[in-house]
Image: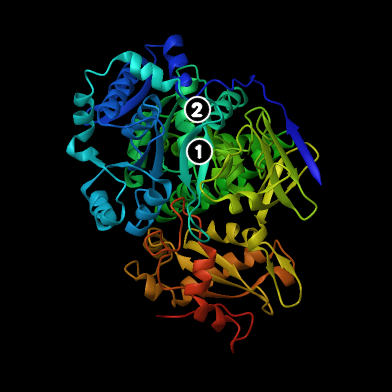
């Protein structure tokens, strides 16, 4: 076992709760711009005082509408300003928010609201209401139903004008650190989602300690800012939203990723929050755009120089004059354009939910963007470890945050203890007992520490594949590098108790026509046609071969199937944070997996049509 402990840098306050973060921010900088709202003419500022006033007004409305302290309010809403407004208003009213992913099916909505015991629900759109309405009859405890797009938040505010300030002040002070702040349901990659009880102390103490650890990220000469585009219903963005209120960071929102680049250009954030797939898309899109413009060789040379330069810098080596000259040239031709596409001011990016890969980490580092990879779970209020601006190692997820202890057991499992670890699974003492060992949270993830206390994630304990020959294989080591290819959407490595390792592969429908056009193929080819096209299969084979070069032959992918479809959240194969539901995929594509091990030579990649 190897263990690293980082003591808290901010003394714990067991009597405080999350509302104190906003109250303290109001006292410190009432006129600071805390949010920017999108409009036709640009971004409209909202100061701390204005946000606080709106929170109080909405909290009064909730009180007037019958919300009692401890009541649970469901929320189905995309990432937008109103999400955080409702979040804080709920806390100021003494209630508890139960977020539901805006992409959830009616049955998922029903489960989250019924299991939590929610007594009211706030929906964003008519489409969200339609999904809720399908299961409303099965939710007898739901009384109030509000819809944001119908102007119901204004109606709630109007109902609360006679509620005195003293009542909100009383209610906001009811909760102490150990009390429930929110009930977040796991995304359900395995089994029914479990409700994670996160306390006020989880958010409060993790925010206060993270603000110190990440002070370089959360400060900027012109004011730190970030544009949120990943779902706030997930603990990652939810925690960052709370942290930004505490740290006084300006926040904008853009839930439509198709509008992300224009929004980045006008908002000009100083740091980003994203999952690795976003960085892969930026990188791959730039590469394919360069190919289409006849500058593919320049881009590849720029990438090679960027990665070599970053590795030399990280190793503390002297940069050769030739590399300095090439780097300066490519900075003018390539790197500066990518920086401009992201708004021009991005200095840091925080990446979580899956490994990014050292290649991309080094590439973005040479763009002047330090990607700080982090690791955590819903059960750890998002972060447990994160690379720091002053202590970063590309390819790791950094050291534990202040107030957090992390240990790696002899079998490789990562366990966590600290201010960030959740209280329990809601109404599920059996699952709670199973996930703790001597007060330590058993994550189910596999990793390793280096001598400096930097953690690397190598896989999931339950996902380790054991071949018929007894070889242990971590799927992520193969899946991540293959998925970085612009053609490829998802990769699922298989082979448990089989004679060799295989893979299911899907194509990226957005990048497919661009890649086909750049490779003198029919850009109008459908995903189904491309799945059996020899040129496409040859490119996938090359991506597989490159990944195979990093592992032993016993661990290498010997055959693959290209599925003629896309794996999506709607199809039931991805979670809302775009992680694969491995057990569902293995079940739904059992026939395709069996075909890997029947008949064809073990060096051949092939596709199966539906």
- Residue drawn where x is 70% and y is 48% of the image: 414
- Mark 1 residue crowding within 10 angstroms, few (<14) / some (14–19) / many (20+): many
Q: Is residue 56 above or below residue 137?
A: above
State the residue lying farthest toward the bottom: 599
Q: Is disc 1 placed on a helix, strand or loop?
A: helix
Residue 560 occupies quadrant: bottom right
User: Considering the numbered disc 2 on the image, is that residue within a helix, a strand or a loop?
Assistant: helix
Q: Quadrant of the C terminus?
A: bottom left
Residue 128 visible? The answer is: yes
Give percent across and percent down for residue 506: 47, 67
Rendered position, 585 above or below 277: below
| Residue 431, numbered label | none
Which image quadrant for residue 201?
top right
Q: Is residue 594 above or below residue 46?
A: below
In x, y percent, where is residue 512? 40, 63
Q: Pick whichever of labels 2 and 1 is earlier in the sequence.
A: 2
Q: Is residue 509 left or right of residue 487?
A: left
Q: Residue at x 35, y 42 (%)?
A: 74
Q: Nearer the viewer, residue 583 or 296?
A: 583
Residue at x 47% of width, y 77% of height: 534
Q: Return the x and y of residue 383 as percentages of the image width and height.
A: 58, 37
Residue designated by label 1 = 335
According to the picture, the residue beneath numbered tag 2 turns out to be: 243
């Amino acid at each position: 076992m190897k263990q690293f402990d980082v003591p808290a840098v901010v003394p714990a306050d067991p009597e405080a709760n999350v509302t104190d973060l906003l109250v303290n921010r109001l006292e410190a900088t009432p006129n600071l711009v805390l949010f920017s709202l999108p409009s036709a003419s640009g971004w409209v500022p909202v100061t701390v005082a204005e946000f606080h006033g709106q929170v109080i007004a909405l909290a009064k409305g909730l009180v007037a509408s019958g919300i009692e302290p401890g009541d649970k309010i469901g929320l189905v809403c995309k990432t937008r300003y109103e999400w955080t407004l409702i979040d804080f208003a709920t806390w100021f009213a003494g209630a508890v928010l139960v977020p539901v992913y805006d992409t959830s099916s009616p049955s998922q909505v029903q489960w989250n609201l019924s299991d939590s015991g929610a007594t009211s629900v706030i929906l964003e759109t008519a489409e969200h209401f339609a999904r809720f309405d399908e299961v409303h009859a099965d939710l007898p405890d739901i009384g109030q139903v509000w819809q944001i797009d119908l102007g119901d938040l204004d109606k709630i505010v109007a109902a609360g004008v006679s509620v005195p300030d003293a009542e909100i002040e009383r209610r906001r002070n009811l909760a102490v650190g150990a009390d429930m702040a929110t009930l977040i349901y796991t995304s359900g990659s395995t089994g029914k989602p479990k409700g994670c009880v996160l306390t006020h102390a989880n958010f409060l103490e993790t925010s206060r300690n993270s603000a110190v650890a990440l002070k370089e990220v959360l400060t900027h000469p012109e004011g730190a800012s970030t544009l949120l585009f990943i779902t706030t219903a997930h603990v990652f963005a939810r925690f960052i939203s709370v942290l930004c209120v505490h740290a006084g960071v300006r926040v904008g929102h853009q839930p439509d990723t198709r509008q992300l680049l224009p929004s980045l250009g006008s908002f000009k954030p100083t740091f980003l929050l994203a999952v690795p797939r976003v960085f892969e898309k930026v990188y791959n899109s730039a590469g394919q755009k360069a190919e289409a413009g006849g500058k593919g060789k320049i881009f590849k040379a720029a990438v090679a120089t960027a990665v070599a330069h970053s590795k030399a810098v990280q190793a503390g080596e002297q940069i050769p004059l030739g590399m300095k000259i090439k780097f300066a040239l490519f900075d003018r031709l390539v790197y500066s354009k990518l920086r401009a596409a992201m708004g021009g001011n991005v200095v840091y990016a925080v990446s979580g939910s899956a490994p990014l890969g050292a290649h991309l980490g080094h590439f973005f580092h040479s763009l002047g963007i330090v990607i700080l990879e982090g690791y955590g779970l819903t059960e750890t209020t998002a972060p447990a470890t994160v690379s720091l601006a002053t202590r970063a190692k590309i390819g790791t997820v950094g050291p534990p945050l202040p107030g957090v202890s992390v240990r790696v057991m002899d079998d490789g499992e990562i366990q966590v203890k600290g201010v960030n670890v959740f209280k329990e699974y809601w109404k599920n003492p059996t699952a709670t007992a199973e996930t703790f060992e001597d007060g330590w949270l058993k994550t189910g993830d596999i990793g390793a520490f280096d001598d400096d206390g930097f953690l690397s994630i190598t896989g999931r304990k339950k996902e380790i594949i054991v071949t018929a020959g007894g070889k242990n294989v971590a799927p992520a080591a193969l899946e991540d590098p293959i998925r970085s290819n612009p053609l490829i959407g998802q990769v699922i490595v298989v082979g448990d108790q089989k004679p060799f390792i295989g893979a299911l592969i899907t194509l990226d429908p957005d990048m497919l026509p661009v890649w086909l056009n750049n490779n003198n193929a029919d850009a109008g080819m459908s995903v189904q046609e491309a799945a059996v096209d020899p040129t496409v299969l040859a490119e996938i084979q090359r991506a597989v071969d490159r990944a195979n070069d990093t592992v032993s032959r016993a661990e290498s992918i010997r055959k693959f199937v290209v599925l003629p479809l896309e794996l999506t959240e709607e199809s039931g194969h991805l979670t809302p944070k775009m992680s694969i539901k491995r057990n569902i995929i293995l079940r739904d594509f059992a026939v395709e997996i069996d075909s890997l091990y029947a008949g064809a030579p073990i060096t051949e990649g092939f596709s199966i049509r539906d």
